[in-house]
Amino acid sequence: MRKGRRNRHRALLARLQRHLEISLDSLKPRRIRTRSARYAAALGERLGLISRPRACSWCRRHARLERHHWDYTEPLNVTFLCDECHVLADAMVVRAASA
């Protein structure tokens, strides 16, 4: 690996670590923690830590996929869903939180 590429890779890893720490910091507002968790998941995918499937994890439809966090305290634990399944998953999370 060339020096410039290696430096960019290290910078991405450092940025990922920073966003993982922010997403777990309970003193930060919830919107900051969730935004950092989303960004950490995007960086994890870019670095190859998370692999994106070709089809929705629920309905197996080949469509544009979105990352769904079941729990924002685990930023790299995501499920890839199509937009219709993502709406259902969000409703399930809201229903579970209100129960």
Image (cartoon, rainbow, N blue to C red):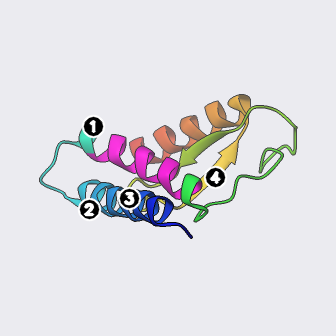
Q: Would you say residue 61 is visible in this rendering?
A: yes
Q: Residue at x 45, y 66 (%)?
A: 3
Of residues 22 and 27, the one nearer the viewer is 22
Task: Name the side, left or right, on which 94 lies relative to 57.
Answer: left
Q: Does the stretch in magenta take in 35?
A: yes
Furthest toward the bottom, the residue is: 1
The residue type indicated by label 3 comes to Leu
The residue type indicated by label 2 comes to Glu
Q: Earlier in the sequence, mark 1 or mark 3?
A: 3
Residue 40 at what x, y percent from top left?
42, 52
Per the image, label 3 sits on a secondary structure element best described as helix
Q: Residue at x 81, y 32 (%)?
A: 63
Question: Which quadrant would the N terminus be assigned to in this image?
Answer: bottom right
Q: Residues within 10 Å of mark 2 (few under 14, many from 20)?
A: some
The residue labelled by disc 4 is 79
The residue type indicated by label 1 comes to Arg
Residue 52 at what x, y percent from top left?
71, 52
Q: Earlier in the sequence, mark 2 or mark 4?
A: 2
Say which of marks 1 and 2 sits in front: 2
The residue labelled by disc 3 is 16
Q: Residue at x 87, y 38 (%)?
A: 61
Residue 10 at what x, y percent from top left?
39, 65
Q: Earlier in the sequence, mark 4 or mark 3?
A: 3
| Measured Cα–Cα span from mark 1 to mark 4 | 20 Å
Say which of marks 1 and 3 sits in front: 3
Span highlighted in magenta in the image:
33-45
The residue labelled by disc 2 is 21
The residue labelled by disc 1 is 31
